[in-house]
Amino acid sequence: MHLNPHEKYLVITNNALKRTEAHFYLDYTNDALIFWHDNKNSGITREPVDYKIIKKSVEGKVHGSLIESIKKTISDEWAAFRFSDAFSWDLNLGKQLIQNDSYKFVIEEKYDHGKFVKYGEILDAELKTRGTTLKRLLWENNTAKVFVDPSTRFEDRPFYAPIDYLHVSSPFARRRFHPVRHNYQPHLGVDFAFSAGSPVYAAKEGIIEEVDHHHANGNFVMIRHENDYLTTYNHLQGFAQGLVVGKKVAAGEIIGFVGCTGYCTSPHLDFRIRKGNYLYDPMYITKPYPFKERNYWETTKFKQLLGVVTSQN
């Protein structure tokens, strides 16, 4: 469990069990860690939370950065970053937005025991920039929660997303302040934050090139693909059983699990794509959904979702 400043928790008296409980709400899931004590004992349990969810509409204009603009409208960093996730696959939000561009989205408010706990998912997002209106929908299926553009299938992108839940905690950057080394250096990959132990998938079929440990990158896997592309998956908690150099893996096959090994401050996947000596920004050649969701637009569920949003507009 990773606690951040200003993170909410709830202390209650559980009359049914005759004990006092402190509820700490976990990121990326609907679970809480419950620290409890009664007159004789104490303990910790992990339990699902039956949240009451209220949908809230938010809109505003861009003045300065998109993140700071949204935080002035809705004072929550998660909402701002989750909105930027919706468009980060095909927009450089730091460079392409201009003053008075506008944003609009619907977000979940989550309540437990009548108290507001945290914001949940952004269900649909709209960004108006330079006279163009862009829309993104949240596609949810089992563990996958990704934003998709209803107008395109990203068929020109050769790689699939290497993870189910795509909160981009650190984008590709030629210059970034390193959270461990405390200096500026390139970050030539994309960090996806997610819970430790979550599966990591091969972004495309290929041959295992390396399975190793590095003091900075932690446990990592490297896969060689056609056309001499190499993908690397860093900071893994561990590797999939039977993963060895020379093994052929299919797109979407589990190769490891999210962790925090090497130079790392919280669980995430550092994903990189290289060809020769050139490192690509993965966001521009990777689909925003994993391989197992490759036919999402053909499902009745997605057609219904698209129909609901279209009728609302």
Image (cartoon, rainbow, N blue to C red):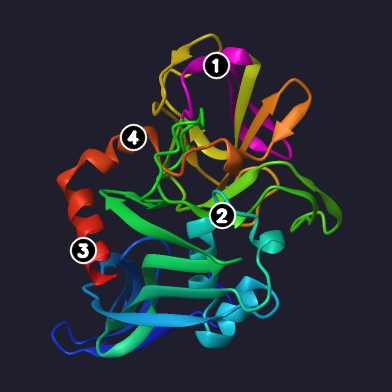
The residue under label 4 is 294
* Cβ–Cβ under 8 Å for marks 3 and 4: no
Residues at marks 1 and 2, CA–CA distance in whole angstroms:
29 Å
Of badges 1 and 3, the one in the foreground is 3
As shown in the figure, which amino acid type bears the numbered disc 2? Ser
Of badges 2 and 3, the one in the foreground is 3
**Position in image of residue 149 (x %, y %):** 41, 51
The residue under label 2 is 88
**Position in image of residue 83 (x %, y %):** 49, 66
The residue under label 1 is 208
Q: Is label 4 in a helix, a strand or a loop?
A: loop
Residues at marks 4 and 1, CA–CA distance in whole angstroms:
23 Å
Marking on residue 308: 3
In the image, the segment drawn in magenta is 202-227
Residues at marks 2 and 3, CA–CA distance in whole angstroms:
24 Å
Q: Residue at x 13, y 85 (%)?
A: 16
Whichever of labels 1 and 3 marks the residue nearer the N terminus, that label is 1
- In the image, taking residue 42 as reference, residue 78 lies left or right, namely right
Q: Is label 1 in a helix, a strand or a loop?
A: strand
Marking on residue 277: none
Q: Answer with the quarter of the image where residue 125 lies.
A: bottom left
As shown in the figure, which amino acid type bears the numbered disc 4? Arg
Residues at marks 1 and 3, CA–CA distance in whole angstroms:
43 Å
